[in-house]
Amino acid sequence: MATIKKTALVIGAGTGGYPCAIRLGQLGVDAMLVEKGEPGGVCLNVGCIPSKALISATKLAHKASHAETMGLRFGPPQVDMVKMQEWKSGIVRKLTSGVKGLVKGNGTEYRQATATFLGPKQVQLTYADGSPSDVVEAEHIVIATGSVPIEIPGFAYDGKRILDSTGALALDHVPESMIVIGGGYIGLELGQTFQRVGTKLTVVEGLDRLLPAMDKDLAQVVTKQIKDDGGEIVTGARAKGWTERDGMAVVQVEVGGELRELSAEVVLVAVGRRPVTQGLGLEKTGVKLDKGFIVVDQRLQTNVPGIYATGDVVGQPMLAHKATHEAEVVAEVIAGRKSVNDARVIPAVVFTEPEIATAGLSKDEAEAKGHKVGVGKFPFSVLGRAMAIDETKGFVKIVIDADDERVLGVSIVGPEASDLISEASLAIEMGAYAPDIGLTIHPHPTLGEAMMEAAKHAVGEAIHIQNPRKR
Ligand code: NAI
């Protein structure tokens, strides 16, 4: 067993870890990144990237099969899922090998091993190939171990009938039917992915509507799409257990005090994720946890000097871009800079059909914070560009402070919401007012004009929609 001395050690090469390792290298800190699996973590290997590849492929198929109104007729899509999976895996391989290259290229050492704390400054590295373990002694240690899917009683993942998101992303065929338990981000993104190429979809949600954490008017647009595509949504429902019958999973669901049976070829369980803190030897460090999450301050420091944490393991929202931002901040903190995580907004995107994206406060949140609130809304149904791409569902909604017209929040449901939201994030981050967006010339004809018009609508000056008579 060798002892290796480093200034900094980063545990976990996901989006909360590898950007930290790269930045540490750039800042001249002698660092090591350790990862037990593949570089890139959940996001690159079994999350954001592979899901977006499958989503974009099936969106194309769906659009093609609904292109009759544009004067185009294609036959029903023929899906070669094995080929689609190969294409998806190629993208993942390119990105994960890129990560490793960037880490090493910036001068940070990379090791594939399992890390376990022996003390606050000492971590043991265990190698899967059985080579003798090493001990790393580091002044600064960053925990970026991420999260894993929550399991619910009675639904142990078996990779065949009962799938987590990883299992669903690896399907080698389009299932004839799928029950999704949990109508949140993952359930809807992956449920719609397969629904678009023919899977009969049923969503079982515990609360009274889909995407309960989002504004109702946003969730409604996606809910309607799922139903229009032939899906069933069962709300206020608790999945109790399942049995295998005639090659199908028969799921017992309690709805309004009554038991119902739903059956499908596969069941995707997506009821949230939990932080990974077990098995790390954290008890040897004294690091404080709260409901399983590692407690950190604005500089990502735990209660133990020299130990930091980033990403899903420090709490909600469990989003890759939040993790990356924290990773960069913590690298600068370790390098002695005065950096803090003082981001005003963390945008969120759900890659449903249509997409949903939010930044800043919702109307209810703004009111709860004591703002007198004004709202501007512009529907894609009256926007030239949206009509030209035949994607007219949804709207842009801007929440402003009615007293000074400052932009407090923006939410979008509709085409390319994921790309449109960055303008809103920048606006809020810079403390912009609605007229800053409204008076900025947006190119025509583009989807971005909806943002400009919504901002104008919020102050009663929209051109292509009726403004409220009195303000
Ligand atoms: P989620 O928190 O988004 O949704 C879980 C849903 O399951 C909730 O609506 C909840 O009410 C429901 N639920 C919980 N227990 C249930 C039960 N026993 N029966 C029926 N319904 C139940 O969690 P999800 O979809 O698993 O995603 C986890 C996290 O991963 C998200 O919170 C998000 O941070 C991240 N993620 C982000 C994505 C993105 O940025 N586009 C995509 C996918 C995941």
Image (cartoon, rainbow, N blue to C red):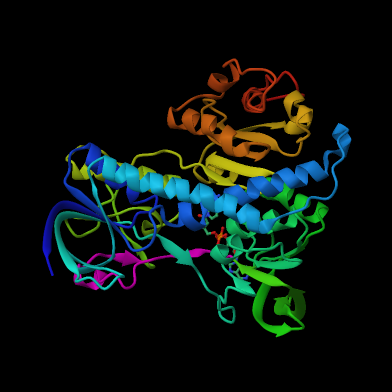
Residue drawn at 70 percent across, 83 percent down: 244
Residue 176: x and y, percent? 76, 66
**Side (left or right) of 403 relative to 67:** left
Front position in the image: 297 or 174: 174
**Quarter of the image where one finds residue 106:** top left
What's drawn in magenta, residue-wise?
270-290
Q: Position of residue 105 (x, y in %)?
A: 28, 40
Residue in the image at 73% along x and 32% along y? 380
The N terminus is located in which quarter? Answer: bottom left
Residue 279 spot, x, y in % from top left: 31, 73
Residue 229 appears anywhere in the view: yes
Q: Nearer the viewer, residue 189 or 401?
A: 189
**Where does the C terminus fall, quadrant-wise?**
top right
Q: Quadrant of residue 376?
A: top right
Residue plotted at (61% across, 25% down): 455
Where is ligand 1, by quadrant? bottom right
